[in-house]
Image (tube, helix red, strand yellow):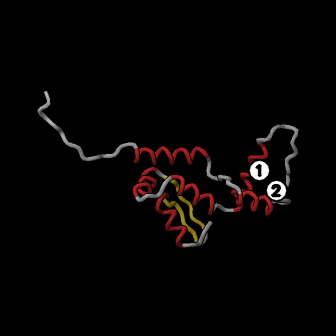
């Protein structure tokens, strides 16, 4: 969710924009756009950091609830997320918590490695050594 034109322009560097509304942008991270970003010097880590930093508050609340559901049995889970949502959001946003799924980050790293795995360098052929 954003109405900031700068954020929209940054998203266009690595996302294929599907829908835009006055305060909402929906896009898909696709290989071709990500590769264009990598060639401009934008790394997969920078993309993930941008997405985490500018994620909507609800993403952090959802992340907390998902993490709580994965805790071992016997630990109480707060069934009413509204009770501590503001505290949870501030706590999660201050920590190094990723709301971007790990498989998405992994895929972006794979695409980035495709760019970096082969590099051309000048060389010369020397003849006459028998």
| Numbered label attached to residue 65 | 1
| Numbered label attached to residue 36 | none
Left/right of residue 23 with respect to residue 112 in the rendered view:
right
State which quarter of the image contains the N terminus: bottom right
x and y percentages locating residue 118 in the rendered image: 36, 43
Left/right of residue 19 with respect to residue 60 in the rendered view:
left
Q: Are marks 1 and 2 in contact (CB under 8 Å)?
A: yes
x and y percentages locating residue 94 in the rendered image: 71, 60
Q: Residue at x 64, y 61 (%)?
A: 55
For the view shown, which residue lies furthest in the left direction?
128
The residue closer to the viewer here, 112 or 101, is: 112
Q: Quadrant of residue 72?
A: top right
Vertical placement of residue 80 versus 113, above or below: below
| Numbered label attached to residue 81 | 2
x and y percentages locating residue 78 in the rendered image: 85, 51
x and y percentages locating residue 46 in the rendered image: 53, 57
């Amino acid at each position: 969710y954003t109405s900031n034109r700068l954020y929209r322009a940054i998203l266009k560097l690595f996302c294929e924009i599907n829908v835009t509304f006055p305060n909402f942008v929906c896009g898909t991270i696709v290989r071709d756009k990500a590769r264009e970003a990598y060639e401009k010097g934008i790394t997969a880590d920078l993309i993930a950091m941008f997405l985490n930093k500018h994620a909507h508050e609800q993403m952090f609340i959802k992340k907390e609830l998902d993490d709580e559901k994965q805790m071992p049995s016997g630990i109480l889970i707060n069934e009413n997320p509204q009770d501590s949502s503001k505290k949870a959001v501030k706590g999660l946003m201050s920590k190094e918590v990723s709301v971007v799924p790990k498989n998405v980050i992994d895929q972006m790293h794979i695409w980035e490695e495709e760019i970096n795995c082969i590099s051309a360098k000048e060389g010369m052929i020397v003849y006459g050594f028998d």
